[in-house]
């Protein structure tokens, strides 16, 4: 009888105790988990675990905050490069590394997966099958669960690899239409305590290709569908009347980025993408729900139920969707502690809502905005920000010590044009116009927003966009990467930059913190700028741009 079956049946282990414990370390919630991957309890306690980083934005709250304090304002200037890793791939790195028990899992633009020694950067194993790319190349990470590494691909597959060896366990096409749907989001493991069901939550990316968005719960054992929730309502569903005719069928509203979960209420918070065709609103008059919205879903039962929604931009015609992961936190508003959820959109707005009701608490414009009430025309017109301006994919972070929301934003403008009509062609963009021509100058800032008032505590301006999200530490630091390649550490209270390092690539990925043998590390990925390229970036000696690199920093030796 195998050890797992022995433990389930209550049979005593005859081997030495240490050997028994090394084979299986946790049994609970109806499922046995291997030692080299987190269990359900680990995910619930991820926010307080300084050593590991097991979800894309640290914990289910979506808040990149660590209680690690070894690196602090008095010594951050002594941070030095501990190691670098250069993956054998091209394209920008947008990955949120997953770190557990001294192993780091990294994905690249073309869905390579690497397991690294988190203390040295040495490769433990690699998986480098290249998929067919139907869109831009991007992968934001993996899910680590039940002995496997899970990731979605650019050609619509969901794949499970053995976490210890990198060998393929199963591989399944899980998108409805491979001509217009693919994955860039990292799968999010979740255990439903009501149903006893383990699941992987994964949103489909099809927001500019004529697809219909959804968030799906997959069975981690075989990739079968547990439930699917469409982000554009179909006939007979509330909100379908905001789409004329059958335009809902290709309405978009992609679920680009991470799933934020409140385990106490089993509420899933999602930011949803822009409507389609992107720039020709005349063919889809109406609010176009639930595009450009945050939705709160009850996932306690067999199927999700909508609790509330808040639409940031009804009838968007500029691709200004909220692409960051929502941040769930407890903050002070009017000297009262409130359960809040924060978001930001590519139009340059930062939003704070009541997490229970969806009621708006504050709205802070944080980028240069111009001509936002007009739609693209045949002749063309100017509007700001550009499609890659405002708040981008990596989002921000909340600091409980200062009641501050830190959000990087970009200032980019564009010249927009539409077409007379939009025709869907499988495998091609479904835009109703052209992506706008970039109009500079292209700059950015790190914003520190007082949650109590929605007003800036401080802002730090850069002469380049500031794409790299935010990492807050309990010691009083906020880290963020500049598109130009500078990784910066700010004092949370003053905004002063206390440390800066040139990674040699362009940063479009988040910064994270972890510990190995009690030593704190900070890690960030950089590489080519990809779609974020602007004229102001320094020219590379390589046609494909600077080489992708993962850089880890620490104190001492």
Image (cartoon, grey):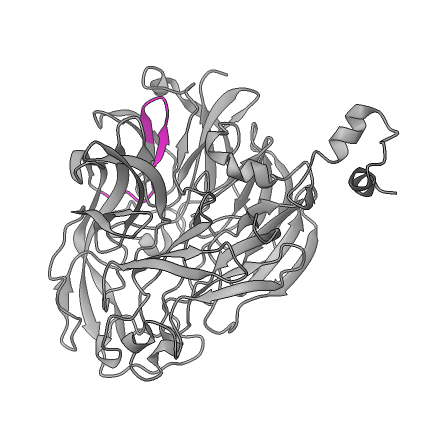
Identity of the residue drawn at 42% across and 23% down? 80
Magenta segment includes 470: yes
Which residue of the protein is positioned furthest toward the left in this rendering? 371
**Left or right: 189 with respect to 448?**
right
List x then y, in percent, for residue 284: 26, 78
Magenta segment includes 551: no
Identity of the residue drawn at 26% across and 27% down? 402
**Is 467 or 190 nearer to us in this picture?**
190
User: Magenta segment range?
Assistant: 464-478
- In which image quadrant can residue 523 be found? top left
**Left or right: 528 with respect to 45?**
left
Q: Does 512 sit above or below residue 269?
A: above
Q: Does 21 sit above or below residue 254?
A: above
Q: Is residue 25 visible?
A: yes
Identity of the residue drawn at 16% across and 78% down? 378
- In which image quadrant can residue 239 be found? bottom left
């Amino acid at each position: 009888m195998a050890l797992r079956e022995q433990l389930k049946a209550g049979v005593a282990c005859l081997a030495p105790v240490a050997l028994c414990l090394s084979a299986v370390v946790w049994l609970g919630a109806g499922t046995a988990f291997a030692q080299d991957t987190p269990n359900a309890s680990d995910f619930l306690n991820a926010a307080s675990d300084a050593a590991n980083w097991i979800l894309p934005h640290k914990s289910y709250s979506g808040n990149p905050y660590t209680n690690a304090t070894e690196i602090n304002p008095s010594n951050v200037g002594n941070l030095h490069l501990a190691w670098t890793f250069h993956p054998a791939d091209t394209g920008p790195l947008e990955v949120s590394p997953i770190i557990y028990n001294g192993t780091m899992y990294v994905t690249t633009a073309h869905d390579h997966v690497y397991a690294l020694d988190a203390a040295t950067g040495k490769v433990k194993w690699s998986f480098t099958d290249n998929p067919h790319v139907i869109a831009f190349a991007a992968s934001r990470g993996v899910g680590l669960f039940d002995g496997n590494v899970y990731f979605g691909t650019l050609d619509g597959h969901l794949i499970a690899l053995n976490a210890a060896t990198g060998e393929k366990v199963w591989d399944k096409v899980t998108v409805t239409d491979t001509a217009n749907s693919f994955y860039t989001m990292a799968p999010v493991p979740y255990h439903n305590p009501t149903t006893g069901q383990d699941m992987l939550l994964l949103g489909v990316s099809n927001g500019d290709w004529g697809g219909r968005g959804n968030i799906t719960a997959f069975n981690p054992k075989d990739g079968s569908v547990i439930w699917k929730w469409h982000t554009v309502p179909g006939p007979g569903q509330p909100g379908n009347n905001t789409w004329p005719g059958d335009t809902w069928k290709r309405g978009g509203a992609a679920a680009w980025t991470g799933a934020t979960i409140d385990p106490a209420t089993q509420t899933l918070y999602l930011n949803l993408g822009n409507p389609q065709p992107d720039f020709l609103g005349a063919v889809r008059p109406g609010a176009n729900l639930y595009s450009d919205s945050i939705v709160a879903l009850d996932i306690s039962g067999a199927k999700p139920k909508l609790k509330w929604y808040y639409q940031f931009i009804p009838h968007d015609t500029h691709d200004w969707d909220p692409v960051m992961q929502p941040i769930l936190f407890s903050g002070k508003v009017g000297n009262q502690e409130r359960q809040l959820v924060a978001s930001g959109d590519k139009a340059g707005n930062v939003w704070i809502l009541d997490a229970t009701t969806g009621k708006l608490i504050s709205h802070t414009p944080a980028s240069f905005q111009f001509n936002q009430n007009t739609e693209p025309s045949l002749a063309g017109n100017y509007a700001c920000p550009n499609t890659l301006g405002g708040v981008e994919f990596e989002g921000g972070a909340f600091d409980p010590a200062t009641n501050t929301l830190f959000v990087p934003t970009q200032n980019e403008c564009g010249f927009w044009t539409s077409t007379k009509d939009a025709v869907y062609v499988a495998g091609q963009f479904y835009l109703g116009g052209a992506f706008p021509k970039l109009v500079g100058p292209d700059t950015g800032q790190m914003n520190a927003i007082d949650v109590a008032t929605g007003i800036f505590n401080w802002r730090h301006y850069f002469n380049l966009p500031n794409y790299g999200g935010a990492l807050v530490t309990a010691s009083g630091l906020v880290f963020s990467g500049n598109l130009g390649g500078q990784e910066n550490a700010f004092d949370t209270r003053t905004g002063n930059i206390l440390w800066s390092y040139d990674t040699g690539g362009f940063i479009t990925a988040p910064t994270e913190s972890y510990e190995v043998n009690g030593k704190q590390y900070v890690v960030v990925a950089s590489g080519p700028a990809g779609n974020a390229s602007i004229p102001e970036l320094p020219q590379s000696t390589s046609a494909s741009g600077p080489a992708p690199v993962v850089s880890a920093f620490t104190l001492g030796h």
